[in-house]
Image (cartoon, rainbow, N blue to C red):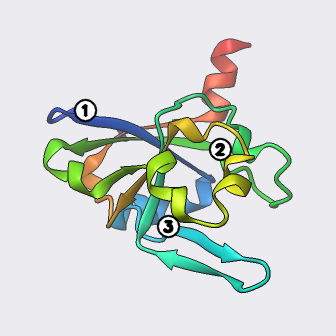
Amino acid sequence: MEYRKLYEGHVLYHFCASQFLTGIKKRGLRHGKIAFGTLEKGIKLISGYQWLTSNGEFQQTWNEGSTLAYDRTECRITIILPKVEKFNLFKWTEFGKDNPLFNDMNSFGDPENWWLFKGVIIPYWIADIHYKKEVLKIIL
């Protein structure tokens, strides 16, 4: 699929495994959640927030040591959020301060590059998709 930049906006990235791309291309990013709470009182998942990063490198510290059966950084989706959506975009280091899990989540590394978007990131805002395998072929 060929993409092109159709408007000016805030450029951020979302990483995912390739098995999620078909749904994202059709319906956008819509299933994001934030873990909130404590082990003692219970951890809840808050829906409606999409995780993004300003770090476009495929090597993401939050993915290192993952025990999932798939690679969460297999695909990099470039998102261009329209300027009008700036009120739905939050810097994690500010937004997450009141979350009891803030320090635990930050320990995965690179939190200064994390962003949260409240709402659905529609397919129209997808500017590009790159696959880790393609990038590695170019480097090697």
Residue that label 2 marks: 73
Residue 67 rendering spot, x and y as whole percentages: 86, 58
Mark 1 and mark 2 lie on one chain; the one further toward the N terminus is: 1
Whole-number angstrom distance, CA of label 1 to CA of label 2: 22 Å
Dot 2 amino acid type? Thr
Q: Nearer the viewer, residue 67 or 22?
A: 67
- Front residue of 54 and 95: 95
x, y percent for residue 116: 43, 54
The residue sitting at 80% across, 60% down in the picture is 68
Q: Horizontally, is 73 left or right of 88 in the view?
A: right
Q: Badges 1 and 2: C-beta atoms under 8 Å apart?
A: no
The quadrant of the picture occupied by the N terminus is top left
**What amino acid is labelled 1 in the image?**
Arg
In this figure, which residue is indicated by the disc labeled 1? 4
- Side of 33 where 135 appears, left or right: right
Do we see residue 21 in this rendering? Answer: no
Q: CA distance from mark 1 to mark 3?
A: 25 Å
Mark earlier in primary sequence (2, 3): 3
CA distance separating discs 2 and 3 = 15 Å
Circle 3: residue type: Gly
The disc, 1 or 3, on the residue closer to the chain's N-terminal end is: 1
| Other residues around mark 3 within 10 Å, as few (<14) / some (14–19) / many (≥20) | some
| Residue found 65% across the figure and 44% down from its top | 73
For the C terminus, which image quadrant?
A: top right
Q: x%, y% of residue 133?
A: 67, 32
| Foreground label between 2 and 3 | 3
Closer to us: mark 1 or mark 3? Answer: 3
Q: Residue at x 41, y 62 (%)?
A: 29
Label 1 residue SS? loop
Q: Which residue is mark 3?
A: 32
Disc tally is 3
